[in-house]
Image (tube, helix red, strand yellow):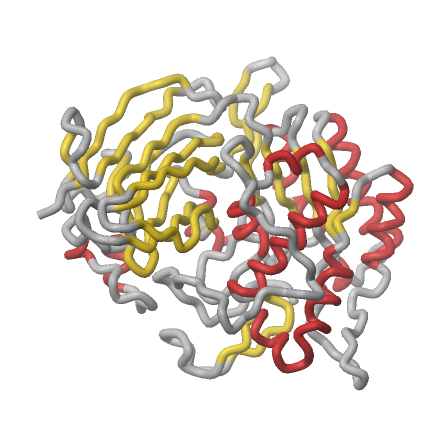
Amino acid sequence: MRSLTLFFTFCLSAISSSQAQTFNFSLDGRDRQAQLLTPADIYTKEKGYGFDFVNIVKESTLIDAKFKKEDRGTSPTAPFFLSVNVPDGNYKVTVTLGNKKVAGNTVVRAESRRLFVEDLQTKKGEFKTFSFIVNKRNTDIWGNDKNGEFKVIDRVKIKDREKSKLNWDDKLTVEITGEAPACSSIAIEPASANTPTLFLCGNSTVVDQDFEPWTSWGQIFTNWMDDRVAVANYAESGESAGSFISQNRLKKILSLAKEGDYIFVEFGHNDQKAKAAGSGAWYDFSRNLKIFIDEARAKKATIVFVTPTQRRQFDDNNRIKETHGDYPDAMRAVAKREGVPVIELHDMTRTFFETLGVEDSKHSLVHYPANTYPGQDKKLEDNTHFNPYGAYEISKMVVMGIRQLNLPVASHIRPDFQPFDPARPDSFTTFHWVKGPFTEATKPDGN
């Protein structure tokens, strides 16, 4: 039986004043000083580390039958989840991929399906090492109370469905998967306190989606950033700029933001549905955007606006209909008045959809015949929410927007990122995505 070995030490977290564990996992036994971790070492809160979601995977409807309890630590190409209990903060994760006995094709994701390493090929006996920063959080908001005591002063008001999201639990979870996953070691340690954080604010087009086939650009965007910057995706399905503020999501970000950080803001899809007095693009929406600006600048963070992604709705001339009313223009107007840089995702996604055309653009969204996924007894026809291919392409547009604006954070774009033009998208016919083990037929909130 192949063994998983574990070595850990303690160090002071750069993010909080509490202690955090630094783990080093070695799957091939090269670290002779390490403590043995067997397939029986399943994650528990008391233990604080181990293979995770073993029973959940076994009992759920699986996309990938390779996720089986009996494979944990015994097969050289079995995918797995590994979790460690750590405080809130940014963590540097270093993975060494490869295997002494077999060739590998490995994908690494973390937390709620954030992509960090895609389709990495290794020959038999070949090892490659990659590092990236994972942001881990829970709902607690820390600050000084009226007596000056530093304590939990509030919490994010998450929805019931969010309570099971990996993004909001007390552990950091790494997913090792792929066509033939080969992982030699995983090291997790607190990132430097000076690590810039890119906070993402938005709705279901931005959020880290937990279930196949729903995917948003925020969880692919991590794949394009180097190991000197963190991406903290606070977006959630169904959110407007106003609800994001009222649910303390912005308050949580502000409790952590520091000089050198970025706050990216994409709203508009759900804001336009408000019908109450005072709602609208030029009043409530514009006012809420101004709150984001003022609060970000008070923390000396850089605020960046991202205009909303288009909906897939074509007119009789095969051109995208403008379904967002005045909201993109209102965002542009506030940005111009306040000197905020704008990434024109609204325009880029229009070009993207029109380039693909009426029928082929369906391949970028959640359009699937019935029974494509387990438990999906009805066809899916969603013209707002992206699938992995669509999210992958949209994430590249955001990266290009950063470059075009010449933002300082552009220095953290990975050197292997290739320039992207939405008028010349990657082919959906050759796009490759290794599905996660969990699927959901119910569409996310928002449209």
Q: Residue at x 31, y 50 (%)?
A: 122
Q: Is residue 132 above or below residue 350?
A: above
Residue 96: x %, y % from top left: 32, 39
Residue 302: x %, y % from top left: 72, 33
Q: Quadrant of residue 100?
A: top left
**Image quarter hosting the C terminus:** bottom right
Q: Residue at x 67, y 44 (%)?
A: 246
Q: Is residue 297 above or below residue 280?
A: above
Q: Residue at x 40, y 74 (%)?
A: 373
Count of numbered tags = 0
Residue 443: x %, y % from top left: 53, 68
Q: Is residue 284 left or right of residue 128?
A: right
Q: Is residue 139 above or below residue 236?
A: above
Q: Is residue 137 visible?
A: no
User: In the depicted view, which residue is nearer to us: 2 or 249?
Assistant: 2
Q: Is residue 137 left or right of residue 57?
A: right
Which residue appears farthest toward the left when viewing the image?
A: 1
Q: Is residue 233 left or right of residue 4?
A: right
Q: Is residue 212 visible?
A: yes
User: In the depicted view, which residue is nearer to us: 54 or 192?
Assistant: 192
User: In the depicted view, which residue is nearer to us: 289 or 363?
Assistant: 363
Residue 172: x %, y % from top left: 39, 39
